[in-house]
């Protein structure tokens, strides 16, 4: 099983890397004569073969495809509507249900500080805006204590979060799997710090992470934490009563099968989870019971209807942030491809 899984992952990683190599060959004047020439290109940058004409050709291809796809919207004068959806700067930092990322933790900290400030009479209640962040509406809002976040601030934070993985990929190449890790980090960093991120965007990182989960025990652990937390964070999107048993059963089946399979695969290595990670993942059960079976029957349901969503978002944000941090550590501390065995 291990050999078969390894071959599948290697094939996918090789395919991704070869696409980049073919792109390099397209924008250069160099031609690969040998198969080893492709392998030698992993992790190397060859500026002496750079061709400006081919870059322009590639740019024209991208431009023409984009123009063809946006042409109908331009003809119907709907291009502003498309851009307003692609760049929702007027729709607020977070969606109606906060995506479980850094800004969910930031918003929650602001709410906690505002409550403490009111209790200690450090804040004027008249100057505090009403619960706009937790109203469930898609709109712009201002933070009470912490500085309000602008689209430019999220762009800067996203770039800062992505740059270390890019530099690592450039100066310390780790082969095809290292490229895939950096690709996942870029997706996760955009999810963590982007503007008006949708909760479903976590799947962009979960799916490719599954390819790495069968290679190393550390990657398997990160995958299980990320996928379990990410899948649970999507529960509020399925909010009707008939969907409740379906979503719980499907997640339990997938999670139990994934954990048991990866434990069998890495049975000769250390456990996939430490006590803290185990405690956190098991905490999803009480959280679901509290949100779905306890809170609806309390007096807080009418006064604070956003509490279940807030708890789900913040709890899942902790797990996703932890998985993002662990993946970053594995990339930054991993040996370069020249010091690893051939993949």
Image (spheres, rainbow, N blue to C red):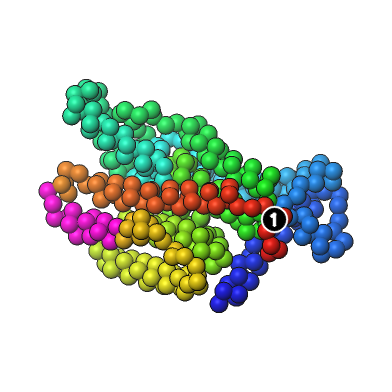
Inspect this view and state whether residue 237 appears: no
Q: Secondary structure at mark 1?
A: helix
Q: Residue at x 19, y 24 (%)?
A: 121
Looking at this rendering, what residue extends furthest in the bottom direction? 1
Mark 1 crowd level (few <14, some 14–19, many ≥20, 10 Å Cα): few
Q: Position of residue 16 (x, y in %)?
A: 66, 59
Q: Quadrant of the C terminus?
A: bottom right
Q: Position of residue 103 (x, y in %)?
A: 40, 40
Would you say residue 291 sits in the magenta stretch? yes
Residue 44 lies left or right of residue 310; in this view the side is right
Q: Is residue 113 magenta?
A: no
Magenta-highlighted stretch: main secondary structure? helix
The residue labelled by disc 1 is 339
* Residue appearing at x 73%, y 45% in the figure: 59
Q: Which quadrant would the N terminus be assigned to in this image?
A: bottom right
Q: Which residue corresponds to the image point at 30% horizontal and 43% vertical from the top-left? A: 136
Q: Which residues are magenta?
A: 283-299
**From the viewer's perspective, is residue 239 above or below residue 251?**
above
Rendered location of residue 321, percent (x, y)? 43, 48
Residue 35's image quarter? bottom right
* Residue closer to the observer: 337 or 125: 337
Q: Residue at x 72, y 55 (%)?
A: 338
Count numbered badges in the picture. 1
Q: Is residue 165 left or right of residue 263?
A: right
Residue 281 position within the rendered picture, expressed as x and y whole percent measured from the top left: 35, 59
């Amino acid at each position: 099983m291990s050999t078969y899984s390894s071959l599948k992952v290697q094939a996918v990683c090789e395919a991704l890397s070869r696409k980049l190599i073919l792109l390099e060959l397209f924008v250069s004047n160099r031609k690969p004569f040998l198969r080893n020439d492709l392998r030698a290109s992993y992790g190397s940058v060859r500026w002496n073969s750079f061709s400006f004409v081919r870059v322009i050709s590639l740019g024209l291809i991208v431009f023409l495809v984009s123009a063809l796809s946006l042409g109908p919207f331009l003809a119907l004068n709907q291009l502003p509507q498309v851009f307003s959806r692609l760049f929702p700067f007027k729709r607020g930092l977070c969606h109606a249900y906060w995506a479980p990322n850094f800004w969910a933790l930031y918003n929650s900290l602001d709410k906690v500080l505002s409550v403490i400030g009111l209790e200690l009479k450090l804040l004027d209640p008249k100057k505090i805006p009403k619960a706009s962040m937790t109203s469930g509406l898609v709109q712009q809002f201002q933070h009470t204590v912490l500085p309000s976040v602008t689209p430019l601030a999220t762009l800067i934070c996203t770039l800062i979060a992505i740059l270390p993985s890019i530099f690592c990929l450039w100066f310390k190449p780790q082969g095809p799997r290292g490229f895939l890790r950096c690709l996942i980090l870029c997706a996760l960093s955009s999810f963590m710090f982007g503007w008006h991120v949708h909760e479903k965007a976590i799947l962009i990182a979960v799916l490719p992470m599954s390819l790495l989960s069968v290679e190393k025990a550390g990657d398997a652990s990160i995958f299980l934490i990320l996928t379990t937390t990410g899948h649970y964070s999507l529960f509020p999107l399925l909010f009707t009563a008939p969907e409740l048993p379906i979503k719980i059963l499907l997640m339990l089946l997938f999670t139990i099968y994934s954990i048991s399979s990866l434990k069998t695969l890495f049975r000769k290595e250390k456990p996939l989870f430490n006590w803290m990670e185990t405690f956190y993942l098991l905490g999803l059960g009480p959280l679901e019971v509290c949100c779905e079976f306890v809170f609806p029957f309390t007096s807080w349901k009418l006064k604070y209807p956003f509490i279940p969503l807030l708890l789900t978002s913040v709890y899942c944000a902790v797990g996703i942030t932890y998985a993002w941090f662990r993946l970053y550590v594995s990339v930054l501390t991993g040996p370069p491809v020249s010091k690893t065995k051939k993949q």
